[in-house]
Amino acid sequence: MTPEQTLPKTILRGPWQECTLTRINELRALSEWAYKESDQAAKWESIYHATHRHLDRARDAVQKTRSRYLSFNGTLLESADSNIDAAEANLLRMAPKDYLIGQLPSLIVHVNRHLPANDPRLQEFHALLRELKDPAKCTDAARTQLIAVVRAASSEASREIMAVRQFRNVLMVVAMALTTIAVLVAAVGLFAADWVPICFTPQRGTDLMLVCPTGEQVLQVNGKPAQLNMNEAIKSTAHPQDLLILELLGAVSGAVAGAVSLQRLRVNSGSLGLPVALAMLKLPFGALTAFVGLLLMRGQFVPGLSALDSSAQIIAWAVLFGSSQQVFTRLVDQQAQAVVSRVRGAQRTGRTRSR
């Protein structure tokens, strides 16, 4: 395959595609060099062809990113990543000893980052380093053991990234579901404002009032009804945009409270957009918290807070309930921090894992 065939004519759409394609072309050139430098080409012929098959497979995954579902669930990323790992292992198998020794610093960082300190394979790796640094002691058996440890570290790195991606995907799915529910609630308010009215009936002196988020009306004056029918009073006082306004206020206050909490989340190249997913979750959660909180107050679920005195108080409570979503999503923030913290190799020497 010529350089003109391996390089695309146009820039790919995302940074991870470009980084992965760069690494693919680099490994392809290194494998060509290692195969030609070897004095036992027949011995490494099958490994050489297998390396190029892995690189072709990784390149296919990079160029098939139009599949939204496969991109979202990480199938294409895992395909590219795992095939690159296999190609790198094959390169270490057939490369000259000088190349292997030159790669040891990067391999040391890679292995130490992803394998636990008490892992027997890591202890074996450190024992191998004393042999591999001496070209005379760099035997095929030592090289095979080294490759096994490096592959174990690469597999652990993939599992770390997969855990973050799966957690992010769950958050995004939940956020989309909550957004759909919030939109449906707002639609109910727009087309049937009297179905779920967020209205209260406070007492002002001798008058009984009907108070809604954007309107007020007198129900009784000095104990005498000013309205013959409560349903008609609600229809004339509750406006179609009431629920929409309450949810918007809840979403805004939830976003503000969520932004403050996100500053404690450690962000790196292994976060995979997790902070964005958390922010997406907090917006509809704040909107629904404002709606549900006021609905519970209207149903006298909270003693002493069942009759708000004015529209301004209803709006203020919507803001308060929206910001209180942080109480419920704090556990999600803590779990996100724990998942990101387990990505020990987000910034690694020797290979870029951009997502």
Image (spheres, rainbow, N blue to C red):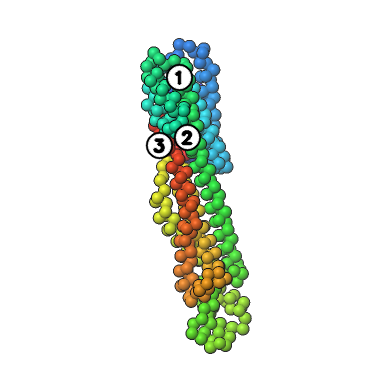
Residue 157 numbered tag: 2
Percent across and percent down for residue 291 are 53, 64
Q: Is residue 107 above or below residue 322?
A: above
Q: Nearer the viewer, residue 203 or 213?
A: 203
Percent across and percent down for residue 48 are 51, 19
Callout 3: 10 Å neighbours few (<14), some, many (20+)?
A: some
Query: Identity of the amino acid at label 3?
Result: Gln
Looking at the image, is mark 3 or mark 1 nearer the viewer? Answer: 1
Q: Is residue 310 above or below residue 290?
A: below
The residue that mark 1 highlights is 143
Percent across and percent down for residue 201 are 54, 77
Percent across and percent down for residue 322 are 48, 62
- Residue, x 48% and y 64% (percent of image)? 321
Query: Identity of the amino acid at label 2?
Result: Ala
**Between marks 3 and 1, how big is the CA–CA gap?**
26 Å
Label 3 sits on a secondary structure element that is loop
- Residue, x 60% and y 65% (percent of image)? 188
The residue that mark 3 highlights is 347
Is residue 265 visible from the viewing direction of this image? yes
Q: Is residue 207 above or below residue 13?
A: below
**Between marks 2 and 1, how big is the CA–CA gap?**
21 Å
Q: Nearer the viewer, residue 266 or 234?
A: 266
Precedes in sequence: disc 2 or disc 1: 1
Precedes in sequence: disc 3 or disc 2: 2
- Residue, x 38% and y 15% (percent of image)? 135
Callout 1: 10 Å neighbours few (<14), some, many (20+)?
A: some
Is residue 99 visible from the viewing direction of this image? no
